[in-house]
Amino acid sequence: QLQLVESGGGLVQPGGSLRLSCAASGFTLDGYQIGWFRQAPGKEREGVSCISSSGRTTNYADSVKGRFTISRDNAKNTVYLQMNSLKPEDTAIYYCAVRRPLSICDMTDFGYNTWGQGTQVTVSS
C-alpha cells in the first residue's frame, strides 16, 4: 500500500520554527518530485514548495521564500519542510504529495497522485 505520512505539525508562536516530515511507505521516493501544499480554513489549497527527484532543484511560493526550506533524504525515504520565522498566516493543514518528474518543479498540483493525510500547523500567540 502506497502511503505518505506527515508529522511535525503543532502550535508555535509567531517567529518560531517547525520541521515537517513526510515519510513514504510501500514505495521509494527516489525518482519522484515531492510537493508540499497547505490549506487554510476557507481557502483553496496552495502549493508551498517542490523538490525535484534529484534534490538539486527546489521551488517555493513567494509567501514562504527565504523562510521555508525543503529537503529530501532518499536513504530515509523522507522529505522535510523546515519552516522558520513562522507567521499567523502560515496556519494551515500541510500536505505532502508525490508525482512523476515534470520538466519544472512548480507550485501546481498537476500530476500529484499520492497524498498524505496532512498535519496541522497553527501559528498563534
Image (cartoon, helix red, strand yellow):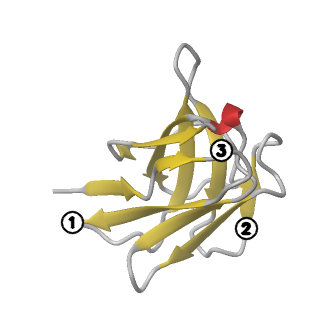
Instruction: Give SS at disc 3.
Output: strand
Q: Which mark is residue 99?
A: none
**Picture mark count:** 3
Q: Compare marks 3 and 1 and give the one earlier in the sequence.
A: 1
Compared across the picture, whether 10 is left or right of 68 comes to left
> Which residue is farthest bottom?
75
Front residue of 11/71: it is 11
In the rendered image, which quarter contains the N terminus? Answer: bottom left
Point out residue 64 in the picture as x, y percentages from the top left corner. 76, 47
Q: Residue at x 53, y 66 (%)?
A: 80
Instruction: Give SS at disc 1.
Output: loop
Point out residue 112 in the picture as x, y percentages from the top left corner. 46, 43
Q: Could you tell me the amino acid type at mark 1?
A: Gly
* In the rendered image, the vertical position of residue 37 relative to residue 22, given as above or below: above
Q: Could you tell me the amino acid type at mark 2?
A: Thr
> Which residue is farthest front?
125
> Splitting the image into 4 quarters, where does residue 50 fall?
bottom right
Residue annotated with mark 3: 48
Mark 3 or 1, closer to the camera: 3
Q: Residue at x 45, y 63 (%)?
A: 21
Residue annotated with mark 2: 57
**Marks 1 and 2, how far apart at CA:** 25 Å
> Which residue is farthest left?
1
Q: Could you tell me the amino acid type at mark 3?
A: Val
Residue annotated with mark 1: 26
Q: Residue at x 83, y 42 (%)?
A: 62
